[in-house]
Amino acid sequence: MEGGGLGLWAEACQLSTGQWSVSWDEARRAFVIEHGGQTQAVLVQAWKISPSSGINSLRETLVHAGHLNPDNDCQFASAPLHRSRHTTQVFVLQSLAPDALAPTPQGEVPEERCGPYGQSTHGVRYFIVDQRWPGRAIFVNEGQERPMFDPESSAWMH
């Protein structure tokens, strides 16, 4: 699939719960997962970043877009994922609080302190920055089970 200067390999699945598929959402400028005609989550999305400030410039962009509470203690941290290549760095937007992913006192799943683009108990989310394209960061949301797209295939087309 191609969209917004990005490309990836994806699949559609007919499960007992209905049709699940990956599609390009022009309004979000992102690849999304859909179920029953409803968007469930953003899977792959490009973001502009300042080449001089790098990934840290994205924090303010996420705050201004309403995806991140400015009062939360969320910062980008390098993440040593196996997908890193010699030209790429992988980052996770994560809370500085050591108990950020711990269950609540009632034993419930905690709220996502770093919003829909940050660290989560619900799956694997990260940003890729490639030194060949220093003005872009690619968000990847693999989810909590086997993703319906090949994270290795996420690529900049132009």
Image (tube, rainbow, N blue to C red):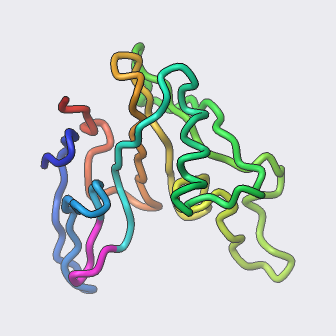
Of residue 67 and residue 37, the one placed in the foreground of this image is 67
Quadrant holding the C terminus? top left
Residue 137, horizontal then vertical, whole percent: 42, 35
- Relative to 59, is 17 above or below? below
- Relative to 35, is 90 above or below? above
User: In the image, which residues are magenta?
Assistant: 33-39
Q: What residue lies at 43% left-to-right and 22% top-to-bottom?
A: 88
**Side of 135 where 3 appears, left or right:** left
Q: What residue lies at 37% left-to-right and 61% top-to-bottom?
A: 42
- Counting labels gives 0
Residue 63, horizontal then vertical, whole percent: 60, 54
Of residue 109 and residue 137, the one placed in the foreground of this image is 137
Residue 43, horizontal then vertical, whole percent: 35, 56
Q: Quadrant of residue 13?
A: bottom left
Q: What residue lies at 19% left-to-right and 62% top-to-bottom?
A: 23
Look at the image and say whether residue 134 sits in the magenta stretch. no
Residue 49, horizontal then vertical, whole percent: 47, 33
Residue farthest to the right, as pictured: 105
Q: Quadrant of residue 26?
A: bottom left
Look at the image and say whether residue 34 sits in the magenta stretch. yes
**Side of 70 where 89 appears, left or right:** left
Q: Quadrant of residue 64?
A: bottom right
Q: Main secondary structure of the magenta part?
A: strand
- Relative to 91, is 139 above or below? below
Residue farthest to the left, as pictured: 1
Q: What residue lies at 17% left-to-right and 48% top-to-bottom?
A: 3
Residue farthest to the top, as pictured: 86
